């Protein structure tokens, strides 16, 4: 069984912010696989189901970002899941918007949610799916940036970024980490733009 945790801050105020992209990806996973977040336990909203015949638990911590480790540890303990079967989806300031990266192990990279999980679990041995959000410009503070909404251009691509990240999680679950890395770690915003144009052309052709 896999535990897929999307990181973010709960509440409608934070929903559209960059820091909540982990929530958005896990919500898309749930929707596409008909999994409902029907429980609130272990400081999380939880959905249980299957993805391509693989049993999964999807979770959105209710602890706020900086205390994510508390929820993750309780979930792993209760469901008797090893950290190696944990997938954490989170935003990443050091990657361009639209790029994703599947990473095994590693440090927290300054991300407070990942820092909390590492400190609480006392291990770095879990999988991360990092979703790039870019760094702020014009001396804008990091806290203000991650807790603000995506800009207009980014909002146009956001559904495709979430779709890409969702597919990457499914690939990890069904085909394994190495295969998923080979397919998704090379994607960029330019790739997304090309794919989006291809989709538009295909849809236009169908309409005629």
Image (cartoon, helix red, strand yellow):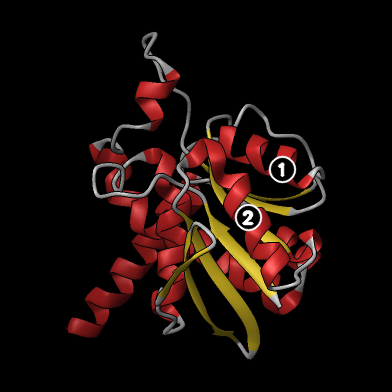
| Rendered location of residue 167, percent (x, y) | 54, 69
| Rendered location of residue 171, percent (x, y) | 65, 72
Residue annotated with mark 1: 120
Which quarter of the picture shows residue 64? top left
Circle 1: is it few (<14), some (14-19), or many (20+) Cα within 10 Å? some
Task: Specify whether 192 is left or right of 114.
Answer: left
**Above or below, comparing residue 56 to residue 109 in the picture:** below
Do the residues bearing badges 2 and 1 touch, measured as CB atoms within 8 Å? yes
- Mark 2 falls on what kind of element? helix
- Going 42% across and 79% down the picture, which residue do you hit? 32
- Going 51% across and 49% down the picture, which residue do you hit? 7
| Rendered location of residue 17, percent (x, y) | 33, 40
Task: Specify whether 114 is left or right of 65.
Answer: right
| Rendered location of residue 148, percent (x, y) | 30, 32
- Going 77% across and 71% down the picture, which residue do you hit? 176
Residue annotated with mark 2: 72
- Going 74% across and 60% down the picture, which residue do you hit? 182
- Mark 1 falls on what kind of element? helix
Assign the N terminus to one quadrant of the image. Answer: bottom right
Circle 2: is it few (<14), some (14-19), or many (20+) Cα within 10 Å? many
Task: Specify whether 100 is left or right of 183.
Answer: left
Given the current orientation, which residue lies at the most extreme bottom position? 53
**Of the pair 75 and 125, the residue shown nearer to us:** 75
Which quarter of the picture shows residue 109? top right
Query: How far apart are the alpha carbons under marks 2 and 1?
Result: 9 Å
């Amino acid at each position: 069984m896999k535990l897929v945790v999307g990181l973010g801050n709960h509440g409608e105020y934070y929903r559209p912010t960059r820091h909540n992209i982990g929530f958005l990806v896990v919500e898309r996973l749930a929707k596409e696989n008909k999994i409902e977040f029907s429980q609130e336990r272990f400081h999380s909203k939880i959905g249980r189901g299957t993805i391509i015949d693989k049993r999964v638990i999807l979770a959105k911590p209710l602890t706020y970002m900086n205390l994510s480790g508390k929820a993750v540890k309780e979930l792993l303990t209760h469901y008797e899941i090893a950290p190696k079967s944990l997938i954490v989806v989170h935003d990443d300031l050091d990657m361009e918007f639209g790029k994703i990266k599947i990473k095994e192990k590693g440090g927290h990279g300054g991300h407070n949610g990942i820092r909390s999980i590492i400190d609480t679990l006392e291990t770095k041995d879990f999988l991360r799916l990092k979703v790039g959000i870019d760094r702020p410009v014009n001396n804008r503070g990091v806290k203000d940036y991650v807790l603000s909404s995506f800009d207009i251009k980014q909002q146009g691509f956001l559904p495709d970024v979430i779709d890409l990240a969702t597919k990457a999680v499914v690939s990890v679950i069904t085909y394994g980490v190495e295969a998923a890395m080979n397919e998704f770690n090379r994607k960029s915003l330019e790739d997304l733009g090309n794919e989006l144009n291809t989709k538009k052309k295909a849809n236009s052709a169908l309409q005629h």
